[in-house]
Image (cartoon, rainbow, N blue to C red):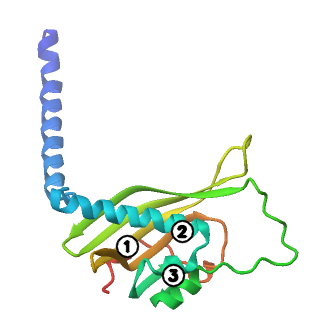
Amino acid sequence: MNRTESLAPHATGGRRAFLLLAAVSLLLLSHASPAQQVTAETLLDRIQVEDLLTRYYYDLAQGKAHELSEYFTADALLDVDGTVARGHAEIKQLYERPEPAAAAAPVAPDRRGHMLLTNPIIEIHGNTATAHVIWTGVMNEGIGKLPQLYEQGREDTELVKQDGKWRIKRRYITADGRLPNRFDANYRQRENPLQNTAP
C-alpha cells in the first residue's frame, strides 16, 4: 500500500466530517432569529432611541431625578433588580438619592463615575421599539489612579413614540455583578423580562 492509499480512508472520513459540520451549521443558521435590517425608515428612530438612553444616564450622573421621570410614559414601569416603580412620582422617588449620613466621609473632589452603554440591540416596529444594552459602571479616583469597574448589567427597555418623541414604557435593569446596595432585598438573577412578560 502506498502513502496515497493509506491516507484515503482518513481523507474520506475528514470529508464526511466537514460535510456534516456544514449541514449542521446551515441548519442552525436557518433557525436563528435574524437581526432587524436598518432601513432609511428605521435609522432616525434608532438614533433617537440610542440618544434617549445615553442622555438618560447623563441625567442620572447629574442627580436629576425629576428629569429622569420625564423620560417615561405616564403609566411606565421601571424595575431595578426586582424593585418596581410605576408612574412618574414613584420613578422619581426611586431615583432620589438618600441624604448622606452626618458621619459620612466627604467625597474626594477628583472622584467621578461614568456609565458606559455598549452592545445596543435596538429594534423599531412603527411607533414601538425595544432596546437591549449592557451597562458598565466605571469609577475614576483622579489622575494617577487607574479607573475601576464597579458594576455591570443589562437593560431591557420597551419604548413608545408619543407626540413624535420616544418615551420608555417598560424598563428592566438587571445587575450581573456589583457591590451590595439598597436593591438587594428583591434581587433575583433573570434573563430578558420583555421576552417573558406582558405589558
Could you say whether the residue bearing mark 1 is in a helix, strand or loop? strand
User: Could you tell me residue 23's position as x and y percent?
Assistant: 12, 46
Give, as a three-letter code, the residue at label 1: Thr
Q: Earlier in the sequence, mark 1 or mark 2?
A: 2
Q: Residue at x 43, y 77 (%)?
A: 71
**Which label's residue is closer to the chain start, 1 or 3?**
3
Q: From this viewpoint, which residue is outermost toward the top? A: 2
The mark found on residue 61 in the picture is: none
Residue 24 visible in the shown view: yes
Amino acid under disc 3? Gly
Residue at left offset 74%, top offset 53% = 110
Q: Are marks 1 and 2 in contact (CB under 8 Å)?
A: no
Q: Nearer the viewer, residue 191 or 84?
A: 84
Q: Residues within 10 Å of mark 3 (few under 14, many from 20)?
A: some
Q: Is residue 26 above or below residue 183?
A: above
The tag on residue 157 is 1
x 16%, y 10%: residue? 3
Q: Which residue is mark 2?
A: 59
